[in-house]
Each structure stands twice: as C-alpha cells, then as structure tokens.
Amino acid sequence: MKLLFLACLSPKTGNHTTAERIRSHIESAGHTCELRDAAAFQSPAEVAHLISRHPPFEGALAIHLHRAGSLLLDIQVPFGVIFGGTDINEDVKVEQKRVVMEQVLLKARFAVAFTDQLKEEAELFLLSQSSKIYVQPQGVMGEHVEELHVFLLVCGLRRVKDPLYLVEMFSEWHRENPLNVLVVIGPRYLFFLSNIDVRQKIDPVFTVEVEAVVKKAAGVFLAQERSQRELHAAMRRCFSVVNSSVSEGMSAAILEAMDLGVPVLARDIPGNAAVVRHEVTGLLYSSPQEFVHQSQRLLSEHDLRDRLVRNGKLYVEEHHCLKRERETYRRLVDSLLCA
C-alpha cells in the first residue's frame, strides 16, 4: 500500500520525531509511506492533486486534526488521523477551526489519541464516533547515564510551552544555591526548503522576549536546538527534565526522560498528569514556588528520586511500548484497504 503521511515537520521537534517513528512502523509492515510537511501545502486541492498522481496513493495519514487533517478533506482515498494535542486542547476553542476538525474526524476511517483524556476531550467537543478513536500511547526508547544538577527544560520557544513560567523563581533559587541551573533547549526556527534555505523564527516576537528575559536572569540559559541523539545525551546528563507547558497532548520529552532514567518535574496540566503520577512516576507542580519545593525534595530525598526513576522506566515499558505502537499503526493502515 502506498500511503501519504502529512505532519508538521519543523526540525528537531516532538511532532517530527513522532512522525518519523510512526512512518518506520508502517514501512516495517511492507507499505510505502511518503512523509510530507503539511506546511508545504496551501490547500486541500493541492493534496488531492498529489494523491491522484500516477502511481496514485492508496491512503493517507495525518498528525494534527487541523494543521494536517484539514488538508485531506478533498481526497478520494481512505485516511486516518492522529491527534496532536494542541488541536484538541486549544484549536477546539476556535469555532472556525472546530467545524473543520469535525469534518475531518467524521470523514476519517480512524483516529488515534495518545491518552484516554485526549479521547474524552475529542468526544466532548467534536462530533465524533467513539468507536473510531483508538488510544495508543507513544512508544519511546532510550539509555542510562550519570546525572548532573542541571534542570533541563525541553521546549520550543512558543507561548503554549511557556518557557518563561519558571524563570523568575528559578533565578531567586539560583542566587541561594548557585549549583542549580535551568537550561532551556529546543527549536527556535522553522525551515522551508526551496531553491534556498529560509530560516525563520517560530514566533519572532516571543523569541525576542524570551531571549531578553533569560539574558538578565541568573542561573537560566538558552541552548541551541540539537539533534535527537544530542538531545538525549543532554537529557541523560541532566538532574531532571522539566515541562512548563500551558497544554500538552503527550510530551515526548517526558516519556523519553522516563525511559532514559531521568526524573521528571512537570507542570500539573491534563496532558502531563495523564502520564505523570505525582510521587510515583514523576513530580507535578502547579506554581513556580511549588516547582522549587518539589525540586528541593528531589535533591534531598534520594529514596524518592530512585523510586521515580524506577517507576518511570517501568511505566514507559508497560504503556509506551514501541512494538505495541507499531502493531497498532500497521493494523490501522491495513484497515484503510478495507472499504
């Protein structure tokens, strides 16, 4: 089966990593899967034209109901969609986007949610058939290595990731204990490839704001984006991986940290709470002050740290198995052949 796979492919982002991994699952089953950046298409008509070219695509898949799924509305072959997180958490609040996403979900052969909570949100806010929404947590794979007292906030410079949420409080804490530092690492740019490479900041105004605030903050640093291999190396060497997002579908960074044996400090939002059980697989916080409190516990309570690392690894192995994820996408893609 020849499959078109649309996703937002900004380099070194969670979406890109997830799309590449799912593509490998599909191709390992003997299918041909062509991954394309949704940003390269201006309308559903362009995708419909691509689909119909000889030899034609026989099915399609998309990550994110609105950004990528909306581009599949004019195609005449079966397709499936994967919720991205911001589509269900944020875009449903915009009436115009919600209507389009309902059309996509109604036409899709199947939909995949990373968590039960995302499925419930979709059922609540979108006109959908519950039976077509499958819950499949993301699968990850990592390694072990020594820890350092560096708190690593893995995120792009986007407002939904809220990278400035902890800066002021962390700076105060750093002045009391200079050994603790916060490093913000992640993509700042979108790349569009044509005859030349165009380098554009994801959110130019917000990027300038973040850079200015961090420049004045004690103990807080911005790091350039890294390849997934380099990022994992940084994660393995940090003391804790931090999430401060306003909303999440399912944070790949959190799951990767658990699999790498690194404790997680995550903001207490539904997407994070779906994978992080407080004091079991990680620590949740609801304010910058509580973040510092939980961090101090992690520094002083060695039994707690060991328990979080052990349980986090077990949780990923049980609920985010690559083999299970691969089998799910193989089965769902095969279902596209059954009209």
Image (cartoon, rainbow, N blue to C red):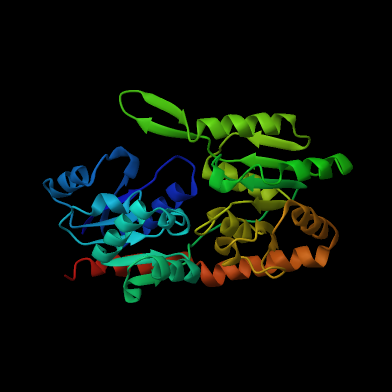
Q: Single out the residue that lies furthest toward the left.
A: 54
Up-down: is 189 above or below 74? Answer: above
202 and 57: which is toward the camera: 202
Q: Single out the residue that lies furthest toward the bottom.
A: 131
The percent coordinates of residue 13 (x first, y second) are: 49, 45
Up-down: is 277 above or below 72? Answer: below
Does residue 309 show up?
A: yes
Tell how many labels: 0
Identify the image quadrant of residue 181: top right
Q: Single out the residue that lies furthest toward the front.
A: 95
Q: Is residue 51 left or right of residue 140?
A: left
Residue at x-position 49% and y-position 49%? 14
The percent coordinates of residue 190 (x first, y second) are: 44, 35
Q: Single out the residue that lies furthest toward the right.
A: 176
Q: Is residue 2 left or right of residue 161?
A: left
Up-down: is 307 above or below 179? Answer: below
Residue at x-position 71% and y-position 53%? 240
Does residue 146 show up?
A: no
The percent coordinates of residue 279 (x first, y second) are: 72, 68
10 and 284: which is toward the camera: 284
Quadrant of the frame with the N terminus: bottom left
Q: Is residue 72 left or right of residue 231?
A: left
Residue at x-position 69% and y-position 70%? 280
The percent coordinates of residue 127 (x first, y second) are: 32, 68
Up-down: is 201 above or below 298? Answer: above
Quadrant of the frame with the C terminus: bottom left
Residue at x-position 30% and y-position 55%? 100
